[in-house]
Amino acid sequence: NAADVDMYLETPAFELSLDEFEEYALARLKVLRKIEEMKTRNLPPDQFTSQLSASIKTNLNSTSKKVDIASHFILRAAYCRTEDLRRWFLAQECRLFRHRLDNCAKRSSDGLRDFLARNEFDLDRVQGREKERLRDKLLSVPGSPNPLEFNATEYYRVPFVQALELVSKRECFVEKGFAYVPLGRIVSIVAAKFRATLSKSLALAAGVFGQVANDESSRIGPLLKSMNSQYTGPGAPNAVMDASGENALTAATVDALAAQSMPLCMQQLHVGLKRDHKLKHQGRLQYGLFLKGAGMPMEEHMLFFQREFTKIMTSEQFNKNYAYNIRHTHGKEGKRATYTPYNCMKIIFGNPPQTGVEHHGCPYKHYDDQNLSALLTKLKIGGLSDRDAIMAHKKEGNFQLACTKHFEVMHPAATSVEGINLDGVGNHPNAWFSAS
């Protein structure tokens, strides 16, 4: 209903505990990442709508508006600090807003009117003689109501610049600098205003972000700084993978599972570890956190690495130089922090690997065309047309789409198997592993 749609114009004044602060933010982050994942997969509109509605129901379906409002402003603060983060947050929030407003408009014209009145949209309604004068022109617009519905259809006059989306699609009549828009298409005008308002608010927030983030006495600053890298899929602290039974990830089963169920980035780390019997620091972090997120217990993680590393060093050297870091990864040393696995964006935009020495990073981003093509052929990933499709995504800079295509080639029946969660396959290595 109209109450579910908010322009987020007023900063909330209610108090939250730190647990609520993080819980609400991560709940909304799951929804926004779901939106990004579905847009990456180019889902048809009906599937996009139904899956987004389900994600909202699962994560933000609170009887209190508090969760929705608080989570928006927390993430606004977390995502304001760089242009890339602002752009990402703005895109997903606008899609979420448009989804909710579209649903409101479809359910009832009264609901849309209520929203417009509550948010003080001062729209100039076209009535009487003026509406009749424009009758033929308004009815000539593609998708307009039929003549029998014309009298009951509300039209509004808005400045041309506020209706650019409708104008570009020829979905409104334009005269003397004004666009004439039926009530059902006012959604586009409102969505444009929401985007402009939020974009300005993010830019303003960026100016004061440093004061909060760099306040050493604040416990909120570190949370905001790390929010965009928080993992919300399988293996997250509140969504630990089931690592029992035949699919348990242990030192004994990891070799088989690496070959059949790991994305290319983790396969390459695994191969590098087995070949060189060691990994450089970034590789140990990327692979170790992935194994942890995939459900490998610390003891098995330690055993697996120890078996490989001690092929080129003594147990004493391993314990002295590497055991502490593994315990630290699992939150058993130092600050005992809970470290989460790297998502695709962190891997793609992280430090590139040194060729021939390091194995971390994203093969689709960091390998040249010749090396990636040779690797895909060596691993017998699909047929020639499949590999060409993967390479085409790589050449266009769509590294996550290349990874998603790899998954689809390896698991052609995945979309038809009930209970398989494909959310985030192209956004997080652990989601890829879990779905596989």
Image (cartoon, rainbow, N blue to C red):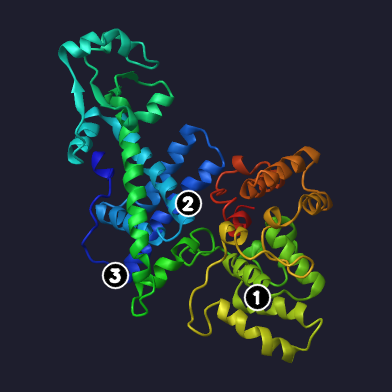
Q: Position of residue 159 (x, y in %)?
A: 28, 28
Specify whether 405 is left or right of 34.
right
Residue 114 point in image, percent of width and height: 19, 35
Task: Compare marks 3 and 2 and give the one earlier in the sequence.
Answer: 3
The amino acid at mark 1 is: His
Circles 3 and 1: CB atoms closer than 8 Å: no
- The residue pinned by badge 2 equals 33
Q: Amino acid at mark 2?
A: Arg
Q: Is residue 64 visible?
A: no
**Tag on residue 301?**
1
The reply, left or right, for residue 374 in relation to residue 9 is: right
Picture layout, residue 199 above or below residue 291: above
In percent of width and height, residue 382 lies at: 77, 44
Q: Is residue 352 left or right of residue 343?
A: right
Q: Nearer the viewer, residue 10 or 266?
A: 10
**What element does badge 2 sit on?**
helix
Question: Of label 3 and label 1, which has the lower sequence position?
Answer: 3
The local secondary structure at tag 3 comes to loop
**What residue appears at the point 76 percent right and 71 percent down from the top-left corner?**
273
Look at mark 3 in the image and give the residue it sits on: 17
Mark seen at residue 339: none
Count the labels in the image: 3
Please, which residue is most extreme toward the front here?
176
Give the alpha-carbon distance from disc 1 to disc 2, as whole Å: 29 Å
Label 1: which secondary element: helix
Left or right: residue 318 versus residue 106 is right
> Whole-Å distance between the Cαs marked 3 and 2?
24 Å
- Specify which label sits upstream in the sequence, 1 or 2: 2
- Considering every residue shown, the one lying at the far left of the view is 128
